[in-house]
Image (tube, helix red, strand yellow):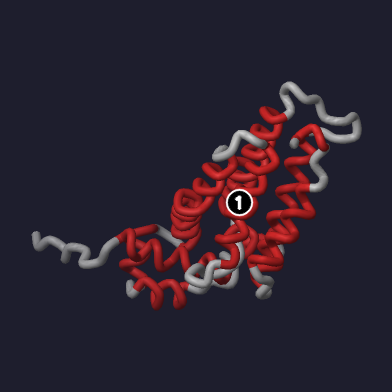
Amino acid sequence: MQRGRPRTFDKTTALEAALAVFWRNGYHATSLAQLTRATGLAKPSLYAAFGNKEQLYLAALQRYREQQLDRHAEALYSDPDPVNALRLFLRSVATMLTAEELPGGCMVVNTATGCDVGALPSGIVAAIDATVNQSTFELLKTRLREAFKQRPLPAHLSVEQLADFFTAIMSGMAVMAKIGVSKSRLYDTIEQALRVLPDSAA
């Protein structure tokens, strides 16, 4: 039996190309035609390499987490001072959101705001939820809990509330960046957001 022709493309390069399309457009607004054009693969080759559109998005999202979100996590633990650690974390996010060489905004937010979430496949919704929880909310909650272990928060504040607040700030910055707001303005927004932390965090 004659063997099929071996793949003549680099799978990682194709995934990077698909990631850029999904990042820019979100899941719902990305068509197979855009994906085949970006990757240079015909539909049969694209399906053979990655499966269907949903599976390709999930692979791209994992790549996004490894390339971008893990770097933010490192920034959150790069300084022992919790306020400056949060500053570095949020600035890392702002830098990614506004980088000219990147598609713009946040891949997760672009997908979540690009359509009615109910129109997304359940696997995509679950992956987005897991990404927000693991790469943002739980990460922030853990770091804030460590910061206030010996310095209790005021009665009107909780670690969970603060983690939610900074998660919302990040989502807002993603939308602002998508419409062209500069990094310097996002940095100013970060400084205002940090004012919510009690003096005992300093």
What is the x, y in percent for residue 69? 53, 50
For the residue pair 50 and 110, the one nearer the viewer reads as: 110
- Residue farthest top in this picture: 150
What is the x, y in percent for residue 70? 50, 46
Label 1 sits on residue: 128
159 left or right, relative to 115: right
173 left or right, relative to 46: right
- Residue farthest right in this picture: 156
111 left or right, relative to 61: right
Whether residue 176 is visible to the viewer of this picture, yes or no, is yes
Image quarter where the N terminus lies is: bottom left
> Does 113 appear above or below 130?
below
Q: Residue at x 33, y 64 (%)?
A: 13
Mark 1 surroundings: few (<14), some (14-19) or many (≥20) residues within 10 A: some
Whether residue 118 is visible to the viewer of this picture, yes or no, is no
Image quarter where the C terminus lies is: top right
